[in-house]
Image (cartoon, rainbow, N blue to C red):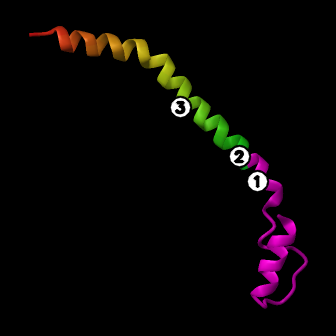
């Protein structure tokens, strides 16, 4: 991935710098882990509130 980013940066014909603005490779793992934690939290909330939701839906369905 790093070689691809360097190739893309070279194609822009920008002046060289010590730090690459496209060097996000070290953060990809943390972003993926954060996304998994966020998705897990959403799924956890859905599982936690499922019985309450089903009870309210059943009551609303049973009401005349």
Residue at mark 3 to residue at mark 2: CA–CA distance: 15 Å
Q: Is residue 10 magenta?
A: yes
What residue sits right under mark 1 in the picture?
28
Q: Which residue is mark 2?
A: 32
Residue 8 inside the magenta-drawn segment: yes
The answer to which quarter of the image holds residue 10 is: bottom right
Mark 1–mark 3 distance (CA, rounded to whole Å):
21 Å
Residue wearing tag 3:
42
Q: Residues within 10 Å of mark 3 (few under 14, many from 20)?
A: few
The residue drawn where x is 84% and y is 75% is 6
Label 1 secondary element: helix
Q: Position of residue 30 (x, y in %)?
A: 76, 47
Q: Residues within 10 Å of mark 2 (few under 14, many from 20)?
A: few
Query: Is mark 1 in CB contact (under 8 Å) with mark 2?
Result: yes
- Residue placed most toward the observer, 3 or 48: 3
**Residue 13, horizontal then vertical, whole percent:** 78, 91
Quarter of the rendering occupied by the C terminus: top left
Q: Is residue 54 left or right of residue 33?
A: left
Tell me if label 3 and label 2 are in contact, CB under 8 Å.
no
Q: CA distance from mark 1 to mark 2?
A: 6 Å
Residue 45 vertical placement versus 32 (above, below) = above
- As displayed, is residue 62 above or below residue 9? above
Q: Which residues are magenta?
A: 1-30
Measuring 51% from the left and 24% from the top, which residue is drawn there?
A: 45
């Amino acid at each position: 991935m790093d070689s691809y980013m360097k190739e893309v940066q070279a194609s822009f014909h920008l002046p060289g710098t010590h730090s690459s603005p496209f060097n996000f490779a070290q953060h990809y793992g943390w972003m993926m882990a954060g996304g998994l934690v966020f998705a897990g939290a959403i799924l956890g909330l859905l599982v936690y509130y499922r019985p309450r939701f089903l009870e309210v839906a059943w009551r609303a369905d049973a009401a005349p």
